[in-house]
Image (tube, grey):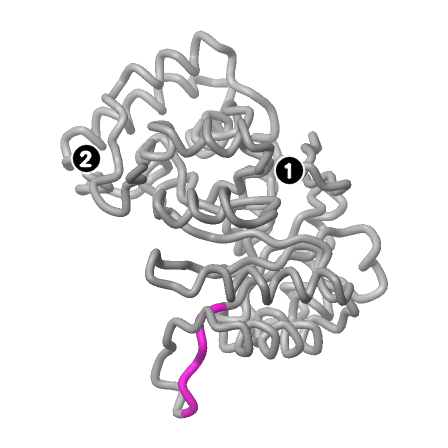
């Protein structure tokens, strides 16, 4: 498995990351076997969040990685606070909450440090300096090694680039959502901040789901894109592998973090950890005009 450096850190992460949100946490034995198989196939980056399964996801992932902690990069997220009655969650980027959430994640994961701790969202109205202060304090205490944000909002990303020492930004990016190509990917690359790409299969639209409107593209445009991906894949790759390879082609991308729920998906995505030939990449780029963010644009 190819690996790539995470920002300017000393961490190397696998080009395919394991998105743990899709794990069937009700079957702990199955989850553990899947995670161990992923490690055998070269994946070392495992991404969870305190939000997933009300913390149970972190517990299952932590147990599966017990005893092999030093072989993996453990990432989790905070900022979404579950209500006491369990009816939903509210956004909370305050320092006190982030510090408390980190302690809870450390306990659930069964580890003394988190390799990459991420803000799980963010708005331009947030007390951003206070949020950064929380992450910096956790870093100084040795409870986290590095921190980043998970956001698709250009204006929020820009503020963190200016005001913090983030190592990464997790964002949605795929052939069916090329909004990051407008300026965010280049901005992050120029600042040596890695991108962790999620949603690379566009909710299955780039694999086998019926075409529908998506991120500003109409149903008919998505259908044209689906046809092009199948033609580009031919006998060499599956459509899923082609879609992932497209994302990995941009130098800002450190890893395509893919939701994996079974052995078949794991084996398929692991074979996508290499680049498309330039000609195929350019052909796919030309199928549709790149879409752009309509909201949360950078104003500077």
Q: Is residue 63 magenta?
A: no
Q: How far apart are marks 1 and 2 (CA)?
A: 31 Å
Badge 1: few (under 14), some or many (20 or more) residues near its Cα, within 10 Å? many
- Would you name the residue on which mark 1 appears? 7
Residue at (67% x, 53% y) in the render: 146
> Where residue 144 appears, x then y in whole percent?
71, 61
**Image x and y of residue 205, in percent:** 31, 40
Query: SS at mark 2?
Result: loop
Residue at the far top: name it: 279
Q: Residues within 10 Å of mark 2 (few under 14, many from 20)?
A: some
Query: Is label 1 in a helix, a strand or a loop?
Result: loop
Residue bearing mark 2: 217
Q: Work out whether mark 1 precedes mark 2 in sequence or the reverse, and give the earlier one.
A: 1
- The magenta-colored residue range is 79-84
Q: Where is residue 277 in the image (x, y as percent from the top left)?
A: 51, 12
Q: Residue at left 55%, top 24%?
A: 251
């Amino acid at each position: 498995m190819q690996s790539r450096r995470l920002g300017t850190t000393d961490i190397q992460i696998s080009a395919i990351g394991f998105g743990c949100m899709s794990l069937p946490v009700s079957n702990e034995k199955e989850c553990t076997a899947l995670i161990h198989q992923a490690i055998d196939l070269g994946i070392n980056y495992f991404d969870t969040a305190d939000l997933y399964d009300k913390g149970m996801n972190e517990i299952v992932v932590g147990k599966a990685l017990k005893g092999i902690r030093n072989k993996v990069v453990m990432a989790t997220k905070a900022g979404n606070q579950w209500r006491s009655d369990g009816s939903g969650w509210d956004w909370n980027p305050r320092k006190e909450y982030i510090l408390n959430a980190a302690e809870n994640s450390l306990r659930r994961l069964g580890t003394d440090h988190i390799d990459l701790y991420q803000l799980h969202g963010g708005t331009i109205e947030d007390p951003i300096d206070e949020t950064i202060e929380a992450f910096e304090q956790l870093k100084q205490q040795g409870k986290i090694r590095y921190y980043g944000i998970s956001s698709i909002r250009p204006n929020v990303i820009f503020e963190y680039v200016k005001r913090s020492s983030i190592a990464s930004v997790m964002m949605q990016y795929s052939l069916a959502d090329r909004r990051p190509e407008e300026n965010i990917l280049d901005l992050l690359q120029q600042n040596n901040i890695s991108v962790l790409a999620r949603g690379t299969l566009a909710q299955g639209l780039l694999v086998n789901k019926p075409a529908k409107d998506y991120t500003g593209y109409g149903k008919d445009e998505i259908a044209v894109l689906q046809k092009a991906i199948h033609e580009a894949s031919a006998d060499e790759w599956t459509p899923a592998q082609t879609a992932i390879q497209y994302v990995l082609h941009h130098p800002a991308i450190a890893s395509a973090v893919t939701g994996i729920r079974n052995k078949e998906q794991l084996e398929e995505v692991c074979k996508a950890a290499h680049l498309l030939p330039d000609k195929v990449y350019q052909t796919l780029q030309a199928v549709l005009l790149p879409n752009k963010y309509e909201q949360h644009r950078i104003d500077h």
